[in-house]
Image (tube, rainbow, N blue to C red):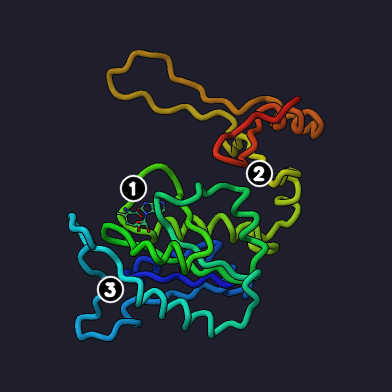
Amino acid sequence: MQFDIITIFPEIFDSYLKTSIISRAIKAGLIKIKIHNLRDWTKDLHKTVDDRPYGGGPGMVMKVEPIYKAIEAIKRTKRLSSKKRKIILFTPRGKKFNQKLAFSLSKLNQLILICGRYEGIDERVAKYIADETISTGDYVLMGGELPAMITIETVARLIPGVLGKPQLLKERITKERGFIEYPQYTRPEVFSPRLRRGQVKKRKKWKVPKVLLSGDHKKIAQWRKKHSKIISSCVCRRIEN
Ligand SMILES: C[S@@+](CC[C@H](N)C(=O)[O-])C[C@H]1O[C@@H](n2cnc3c(N)ncnc32)[C@H](O)[C@@H]1O
């Protein structure tokens, strides 16, 4: 899987790509992430990527031309059928991102991610260039860089080998491509937060549920099932018992 990110702030991704599982997956050759500075596809001295909106109004709008050129250049570097690649534009008006969409994206070979900035992007990018518009939630961010990272993380962890333990994924994916999530605990068995000076209350004891310490795998599985939620579409639902 190759992720190509088009942004005017490439430096945002510097530490992200060097960290943890993502960096290991890159080193292991399981994923490739290429960052493209949109300004490299401008012609003028100031490397202008934005202009005033037609019809007036506040703020600036990202121009279609540099984005078109960037996409065409990126496509030329990797010969692929259009079924194996998707061009994604991030916008709060897009399709809501969820686990199911992440699954379908994880089956592709290349994702080209367009990160917007300013007041938005010339609508012709959504209309004629992007295959999909994605929103990560009902809020307006300053740019598409965080949505790009969210997409990469959610999709990359579904690629075999990235998490290191294939059985972990197998056990937790449902038939409808939802993801099973349950509460997790680790040592110590009992944690007692310190009382602040002058506090007269009894010291609290935060305990791990007994069943998880029992070593009884059947009971543990039942407990996890009972407390699981399936993350699939916009809503989380409880697993039916
Ligand atoms: C200030 S927003 C502009 C929003 C613009 N009016 C629009 O409808 O796309 C700047 C950029 O941040 C990104 N963005 C903001 N909120 C987002 C969200 N909820 N989901 C995905 N991308 C978002 C988009 O790439 C957007 O072009």
Looking at the rendered image, the disc whose residue lies closer to the viewer, 2 or 1, is 1
Nearer-N-terminus badge (1/3): 3
Q: As drawn, is 176 to the left or to the right of 127?
A: right
In contact (CB < 8 Å): disc 2 and disc 1: no
Which amino acid type corresponds to the residue marked 2 in the rendered image?
Phe
Which amino acid type corresponds to the residue marked 3 in the rendered image?
Val
Q: As drawn, is 81 to the left or to the right of 26?
A: right
Nearer-N-terminus badge (2/1): 1
Tell me the distance, in whole angstroms, between the alpha carbons under discs 2 and 1. Answer: 26 Å
Query: Element type at marker 1?
Result: loop
Query: Crowding at label 1, few (<14), some or many (≥20) Cα neighbours within 10 Å?
Result: few
Looking at the rendered image, the disc whose residue lies closer to the viewer, 1 or 3, is 3
Judging depth in this view, the residue of 120 and 28 nearest the camera is 120
Q: Which residue is mark 2?
A: 179
Q: Which mark is residue 49?
A: 3
Tell me the distance, in whole angstroms, between the alpha carbons under discs 2 and 3. Answer: 39 Å
- From this view, report whether residue 56 is shown above or below residue 24: above
- From this view, report whether residue 71 is shown above or below residue 25: below
Query: Element type at marker 2?
Result: strand
* Quadrant location, ligand no. 1: bottom left
The image shows residue 99 at horizontal and vertical percentages of: 60, 48
- From this view, report whether residue 201 is shown above or below residue 45: above
Q: Which mark is residue 140?
A: 1
Instruction: Look at 34% across and 13% down and name the residue there.
Output: 200
Instruction: Look at 47% across and 83% down and name the residue there.
Output: 73
